[in-house]
Image (cartoon, rainbow, N blue to C red):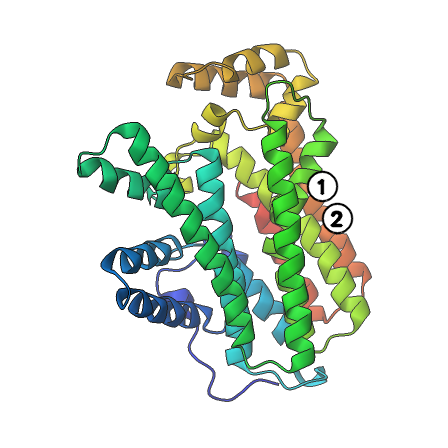
Amino acid sequence: MTSPDRPQPAAQAGKTPSFKDPALARLQHNGADQVLAKFLEHSTRRAAEISPGFAQLWTEIERLSTGGKRFRPALVALAANAYGDTAQCSVTDRMIATVGAAFELLHSALIIHDDVIDRDISRRHGPTLHAAAQQRAEAQGIDHKRAAHYGHSVGIIAGDLALSGAHHLVHTAGLSPEHAWRVLELVDHAVFASAAGELMDIDHALPAANPTPAAVVEATRLKTSVYSFEAPLQAGAVLAGAPQEHIQVLGEIGVKLGLAFQLADDLLGVFGSDRDTGKSTDGDLREGKHTLLIAEARTRDGGAEVLTLLAQTELTARDADRVRQVLTDCGARQAVEEQAAQAAREAVALAESAELPPALVQQLRDVARDAVERIR
């Protein structure tokens, strides 16, 4: 199925997932790091021919694309490699790696834009792309308001470039016309769904909004699960020529896995540590994001106090600690933990009930387990 000269996986080069997710750390992604690094290096050289500032922008995109969990390329490879000699097509490691790199660059695009929307200033233990641009502008003596606008503008441009780059990588993966079309359809679906989820997310943050827990879960599914889990698993299965019913169920499994991971991330974003998450654990609270934690709190005693605190113009560290306490005392934290665990269990049940390759089922079982182990 795969070419004999497969590149060495880059999981040993400081790219392993963070938190307690050893299953993802063990997964190989068939050299997606090398493909992505080569693409970003080439883009930076192209940009340098135009202007130093444009080259610096690409250097910043590279910085934001380095050091992530890399589970999207790993999931592409996981599904693509699962069928071994039973695969109905010839797919090389380069194809798998390039498609995996495309999903990783898509992730970079979406988080760059998301950081602008959420006004986050830290990511992966460093400044977000737009915050770094703002800092450079202020260092040149530009006033804060104008520098902030400059930073946001740079972030929008960078996200657009990364999004276009993801499509370009699929085009250059060497896939057959049919497989290229099907993978691009998955990328298009992922972008479309993520945009819908992002819009729902910002709508939910409006002062008059009163999103139900179900509405928040749907926004989470659209914004994160589709592009991070559903589409990569399906893309890998497409590359392997897997049966359509397997591609379908892998998408359903991906939705459940994505929900489990995102709910765990939401919990870590409030109750974790800055050291582990690479960003401020007060950020979501200061932004007033209506995660499932907040939606659950609204339905319980103490919810009114949470909303009052989050509505403040400036949320102090003491206020943030009080919100955490109320979220714990009212049962919202436990409810979200239970929903994350339930989503993981449902993912496993789907995998076990389908006639997927046994090794694939076991790996999906491990990933589902580790999704919720991170919050224990």
Question: Which residue in the protein does label 1 denote?
Answer: 342
Q: What residue type is labelled 1?
A: Gln
Q: Residues within 10 Å of mark 2 (few under 14, many from 20)?
A: some
Up/down of 257 relative to 182, above or below:
above
Kindly indicate whether the residue at mark 2 contacts the one at mark 1 (C-beta within 8 angstroms): yes
Residue at 49% x, 25% y is 285
Q: Is residue 2 above or below residue 297?
A: below
Furthest toward the bottom, the residue is: 4
Q: In the picture, residue 231 is in which quadrant?
A: bottom right
Kindly identify which numbered label has been placed on residue 294.
none
| In the displayed structure image, the side of residue 365 where residue 57 appears, left or right | left
Disc 2 target residue = 346
Q: Quarter of the image holding residue 293?
A: top right
Residue 48 location (% of width, % of height): 26, 65
Image quarter where the N terminus lies is: bottom right
Q: Which amino acid does label 2 sit on?
A: Glu
The reply to whether residue 28 is in sight is: no
